[in-house]
Amino acid sequence: MSLWARFKNTTLYKSIYRNEYPDTPRNQVLVILNSVVLHLHPVKVPRRAVRMSYTWGLGGLSLLMFLILTVTGVWLMFYYVPAVPDAYESMKLLETNVIFGPFARNLHRWAAHGMVIAVWLHMTRVFYTGSYKPPREFNWVIGVVLFLVTVLLSFTGYLLPWDQLAYWAIQVGSNMAKVSPVIGTYVQRALLGGFDIGPATLVRWYTLHVILLPLACIVLMAMHFWRIRKDGGISTPIPYDEDEDQDENPPPGGDEPNK
Ligand code: HEM
C-alpha cells in the first residue's frame, strides 16, 4: 500500500476530508456540500446563467475589489495614525520610509475606484437584464444599500490623509448634508463630531471607515449571496432549457432549482 493510500486511511485525513475524490457526479456534489467554503456555491447552476457575456463577472469583481481593499486596508492600519496632526505625517512617512508603502497605498486607492466602478456596472447589468424583477426584488434593495455603503466607504477614506484635498472635500460633503430638509443640520453635526471639521471628525470618519462600514458591507454581502441561492440562483437570460443542462448521470436532487 502506498504512503498516500495509508495516509488516506488515517483518522487525521478522515477528520478533514469526508468524501472520495470527486470523479463521479455523487462525489462532486458531496465535495461541495461538505466544504465550508464551497458550500456557499449552489451544487448546480444552469450553464447559460454563468456565461461571461451575461454577468460579465461584475458581482465577483466587486467582491474581489472588496477583498483587496480589506487586505491592503489592514496593511495601511499598521502605519496610519488616526489623530491630528499625525495622520498627515504618517501618510508622508508611509510614502517615503516604508518598504512597499506607496504600493499598498496605491493598491488601496485603485481598488477603491475599481470597486465603485464594478458595483455601478454590476447594478447596470442587473437592471438591463431585468434581474431585479420577482423573485429578486429584495436582493435589488440589498444591492442598493450595498452601493450606498460602497460610496460611503470611498468618501470616508478620502478624509483620512488629512491633506488639503481631504479637508475641503469634507467641507463640501458635509455642507451638502446640511442642506437636506429638516435633519440637515443634525446630520452635518453628527458627521463632523461638532460644529466644524476637527480632531473629532477624523476619529469619527476613521471608525466609520475601518469598522462600521466594512462590517455592514460584510453582513449585507452575506445576505446578498444567500438570497441569490434562495431566489433560484442567477437569473437566466432566456427560459430555462432543461435539455441543455442534462447530465448523463444527474446528481442527487435531479433538476430541482438550487435552494
Ligand atoms: C458590494 C457590492 C456587490 C457585490 C459584491 C455583489 C455580488 C453579486 C454576485 C457575485 C452576484 C452573482 C451574479 C453576478 O456576478 O452578476 C450578484 C447578483 C445580483 N446582484 Fe449583486 N453585488 C453587489 C452589489 C449589487 C448592487 C448595487 C445591486 C443592485 C442595486 C445588486 C443586485 C443584484 C441582483 C438583483 C443579483 C441577482 C442577479 C441575477 O440573478 O441575474 N448587487 N451580486
Image (cartoon, rainbow, N blue to C red):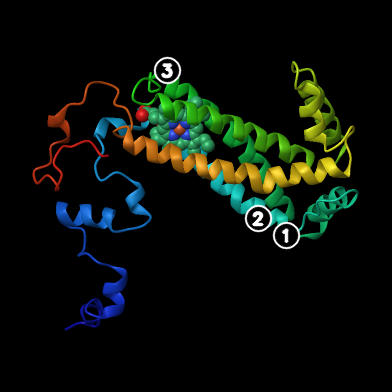
Q: CA distance from mark 1 to mark 3?
A: 42 Å
Labelled pair 2, 3 in contact (Cβ < 8 Å):
no
Residue receiving disc 1? 78
Horizontal side, residue 201 vs residue 44: left or right: right
- For the view shown, which residue lies furthest in the front direction? 182
Relative to 16, is 216 above or below? above
* Percent of width and height locating residue 16: 32, 70
- Determine if residue 142 is in view: yes
Q: CA distance from mark 2 to mark 1?
A: 7 Å
Q: CA distance from mark 2 to mark 3?
A: 36 Å
* Percent of width and height locating residue 90: 83, 54
Residue receiving disc 3? 128
Labelled pair 2, 1 in contact (Cβ < 8 Å):
yes
Residue receiving disc 2? 74
Relative to 117, is 25 above or below? below
For image coordinates 25% across by 34% down, the residue present is: 47
For image coordinates 75% across by 17% down, the residue present is: 182
* Percent of width and height locating residue 176: 78, 21
- For the view shown, which residue lies furthest in the top direction? 181
**Amino acid, disc 2:** Val
Horizontal side, residue 138 vs residue 88: left or right: left
Q: Quadrant of the C terminus?
A: top left
Query: SS of the residue at dot 2?
Result: helix
**Amino acid, disc 3:** Tyr
